[in-house]
Structure formats: C-alpha cells, structure tokens
Amino acid sequence: MKRFLLLLIVPIALMAATTSTIVSTNATSAKIRSVDLPAGTSGIVVHDYDGTHRSIVARAILVAPDTIRFEVFDALAQDALPKPLTKPKAGDKVILSYLYDRALIIAPNLQTYQEIAAQTHDKLLHPDLFVAELAKRGHKMPQREDFKDFCNRYALAKLYIARKSGTDVVDCYSFKKVGSLDVRASGKETKLPFYNRFRRIPGSLFDFFSNDEYNYFDYYKKLER
C-alpha cells in the first residue's frame, strides 16, 4: 500500500492549481472553502494519511463556489494495484483545475487549430492521438465518454472546441464550458471528425465518412448541451 500512495505524490505536487479544503461531506458531495472558479471545473480530492503518504481518493466536480460533487477517480486504475478505500473527509485537500495545463484542440481545419494553439501556453496533445483512439472503437464522431477515456489515458482535463462564434474551453470530465477564447472557426475546409493529419485510416469506419452525414458545427453544439 505504501508504494501505491507514494506513486501518487508526484502528479499531485506538479499539477496543483486552485486549492481548497473540505469543510463537511455527505455520500456524494461536500462543502468546501469557497473558490472563484466556474461551475463544471474538475479536480481531485487528496487525503493525507501522515506526513509522508497521501492519495487521490475521488474526482471533484465544482457545482457551486462552495460545493463539489464526487466522482470515482479512475485515471490511475490498474488491476495490479490495490484500490484505496478511503472516503473523502473534512480536512481533505481539493485541487481544482487539476491537469488544466494539458489540453486537446478540436477544430474543423488546420488554420483554426493553429489560431487556437497560438492563444494558449498549455501542453497540447495532437488530435491524431484522439482520432486513432476513435478509429479503434469504430466511432465516426466522438461521444462524451470517448473524451473522458482519452483524457484519463493521456492525463489532461481541458478541451478547446472551435465554433463559429468563438472557441469554448470545456472541462473533459464534466463537459461543461469553463471559459472561452476569442478565436472563431475560419477557413473554408471542414475535416471530420475534427482536424487531424490522417489521410486515410485503414479498416476503420472513417474510410466511409460522408460530410453529408455529419456537420461539424451542429454536432459539437449538440454534444456540449
């Protein structure tokens, strides 16, 4: 168990963003010291066992400035490691905007992708990685669960989704809009399911993609609702 707890110390220390503390809990949510962040911001709950050992015991989703709800933190799930049974408690640390310095851009074309990338200092994962994951699943267009699974696997928590009116900053786990960029989708080309460098993905449903079947802007507008 000690080895398991020690493994979790490094990402907690490196990725700390906005920190709060749990004041009181119930089975599914907690009151925290108020924070100035948008509803939908995700994070983690960290329990200190002693001065040396700590562990992530839940995912947190901010629902009000002083309230979070709990979700299972499954990003580090491994069959070979024991699962922590500790429940969040008063006094536990809440780190919100956890992994918000790593992001994925969803854009209709290269021009828009580059314009968004120029406006952020985040570490950006290339959309080729995500489109390859979708191809493995046989999904033509990503579902919310696809985003969550991808973010878990590649350790990120923020999405930039380009739209005609601007770019939405979306939390990967709550799928709520938590910010925006004044970058509107530009260029005439629209590539589905989003900008990527693949010309063809053999053996996948993408070989049979039709622009008449999906509209990029309509699809992501509905997905964010």
Image (cartoon, rainbow, N blue to C red):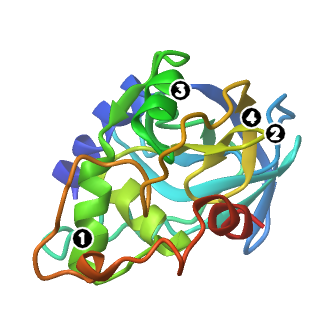
Label 4 – label 2 distance at C-alpha: 8 Å
Disc 1 vs disc 3: Cβ atoms closer than 8 Å? no
Disc 4 vs disc 2: Cβ atoms closer than 8 Å? yes
Q: Tell me which residue sits at (49%, 58%) in the image.
A: 57
Instruction: Count neighbours of disc 2 (C-alpha within 10 A) and say few if under 14, some if 14 to 19, many if 20 or more.
Output: some
| Residue 219 locus on image (x, y percent) | 63, 68
Q: Which residue is mark 3?
A: 116
Quick one: SS at disc 4? strand
Q: Quadrant of the C terminus?
A: bottom right
Q: Which mark is residue 208?
A: none
Q: Which residue is mark 4?
A: 179
Q: Is residue 183 above or below residue 109?
A: above
Amino acid type of the residue tagged 3 in the rendering: Ile
Q: Which residue is mark 2?
A: 38
| Residue 202 locus on image (x, y percent) | 10, 75
Q: Is residue 92 visible?
A: no
Amino acid type of the residue tagged 1 in the rendering: Pro
